[in-house]
């Protein structure tokens, strides 16, 4: 199969028939073998009924239904698990992504031997305050922390090699940073293509302000995993040693002051420096232990993977 089109959706019944017909027209005109995978992320309208009708009319249509809303990342993950095409195209169901871009994304991915091609909505038709400005901020922060030089991380229109979607694990709100996940998994051939963005034709956006908070938290998570995921002691151990040295320095100062400079002054326990020293040393010890435990967990997982590889080799 040439292409799997993976489409997560939430309450997009009005656009599904039009989107389906548009995709089919593009696939047939380019003679692609294809499948369309709709993932209904807990819709409360008649989206699932429409997907069932489309699957009866077109054997290339498949559907996955969540009984509640789990989020776009989980919907994409479910779609990636069942996708069979050599190239996987993701797009939104609101008709703001144009299926006419699919052939060029496909040719660019295979022609330039890339792992991932990400769409770039140069001209957007979203609200400037609600989506444009926050998106620019997200994209700037993602570029700085990840090293992946894309203008638009969150564009729903992307093309992947099959190996990429079968390797990465998308959860939480990580769908915004799939290019970063791909890079961390070793798929570094990532490029960007300007794509057409269209005004929403039906309904309204499903994303609220909470997505910005979740997005930043997930960005911090990805940054940490990218930089220290394989060596947690480098972060926790360094911070722990630093805090312990600070506490030890305050303790040494108090001891020297009490023994040689002001032996008849206040009790050490009555001085604020005592509590700073105590707190710093306790926090430092805890950070060091956290890094040590992280290294033990990683060592255990590496040994497990080594045993599995050895078992498969012996078989």
Image (cartoon, helix red, strand yellow):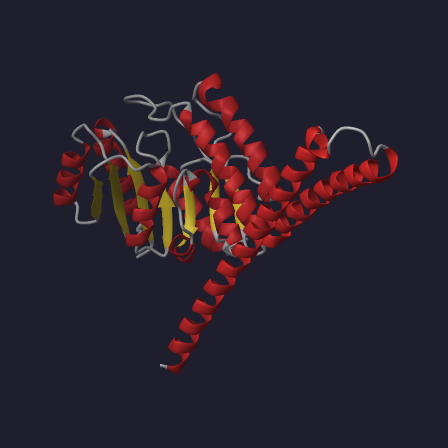
Q: Is residue 77 above or below residue 152?
A: below
- Is 206 on the left-hand or right-hand side of 303? left
- Is 100 on the left-hand or right-hand side of 139? left
At horizontal 37% and vertical 46% (from top left) the residue drawn is: 89
Quadrant holding the N terminus: bottom left
Quadrant holding the C terminus: bottom left
Q: Is residue 315 above or below residue 168?
A: below
- Is 310 on the left-hand or right-hand side of 122? left
Residue 209 picture location, percent across and down: 42, 23
Residue 157 picture location, percent across and down: 41, 39
Q: Give the tally of numbered discs.
A: 0
Residue sitting farthest toward the bottom: 314
At horizontal 72% and vertical 32% (from top left) the residue drawn is: 273
Residue 275 picture location, percent across and down: 66, 34
Examine the rendering and report whether any part of residue 111 can be seen: yes
Residue sitting farthest toward the front: 264
- Is 227 on the left-hand or right-hand side of 84? right
Of 242 and 247, which appears nearest the observer?
A: 247
Of 195 and 134, which appears nearest the observer?
A: 134
Examine the rendering and report whether any part of residue 120 can be seen: no
At horizontal 46% and vertical 44% (from top left) the residue drawn is: 178
Question: Looking at the rendering, which quadrant does residue 274 occupy?
Answer: top right
At horizontal 17% and vertical 36% (from top left) the residue drawn is: 48
Residue 267 picture location, percent across and down: 73, 31
Of 289 and 140, which appears nearest the observer?
A: 289
């Amino acid at each position: 199969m040439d292409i799997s089109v993976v489409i997560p959706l939430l309450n997009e019944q009005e656009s599904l028939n039009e989107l389906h017909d548009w995709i089919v027209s593009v696939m047939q005109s380019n003679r692609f073998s294809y499948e369309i995978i709709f993932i209904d992320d807990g819709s409360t309208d008649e989206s699932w009924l429409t997907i069932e009708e489309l699957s009866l009319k077109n054997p290339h249509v498949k559907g996955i239904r969540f009984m509640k809303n789990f989020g776009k990342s989980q919907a994409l993950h479910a779609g990636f698990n069942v996708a069979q095409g050599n190239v996987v195209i993701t797009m939104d169901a609101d008709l703001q992504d144009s299926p006419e871009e699919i052939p060029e994304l496909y040719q660019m991915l295979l022609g330039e031997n890339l792992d991932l091609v990400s769409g770039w909505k140069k001209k957007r038709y979203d609200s400037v305050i609600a989506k444009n400005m926050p998106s620019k901020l997200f994209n700037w922060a993602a570029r700085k922390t990840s090293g992946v030089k894309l203008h638009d991380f969150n564009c729903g229109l992307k093309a992947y090699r099959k190996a990429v979607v079968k390797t990465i694990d998308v959860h939480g709100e990580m769908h915004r940073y799939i290019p970063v996940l791909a890079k961390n998994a070793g798929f570094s051939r990532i490029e960007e293509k300007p794509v057409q963005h269209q005004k929403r034709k039906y309904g309204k956006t499903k994303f609220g302000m909470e997505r910005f908070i979740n997005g930043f938290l997930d960005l911090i998570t990805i940054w940490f995993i990218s930089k220290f995921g394989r060596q947690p002691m480098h972060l926790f151990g360094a911070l722990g040693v630093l805090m312990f040295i600070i506490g030890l320095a305050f303790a040494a100062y108090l001891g020297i002051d009490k023994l040689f400079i002001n032996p008849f002054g206040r009790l050490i326990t009555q001085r604020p420096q005592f509590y700073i020293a105590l707190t710093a040393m306790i926090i430092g010890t805890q950070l060091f232990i956290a890094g040590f435990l992280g290294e033990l967990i990683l060592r255990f997982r590496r040994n497990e993977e080594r045993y599995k590889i050895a078992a498969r080799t012996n078989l």
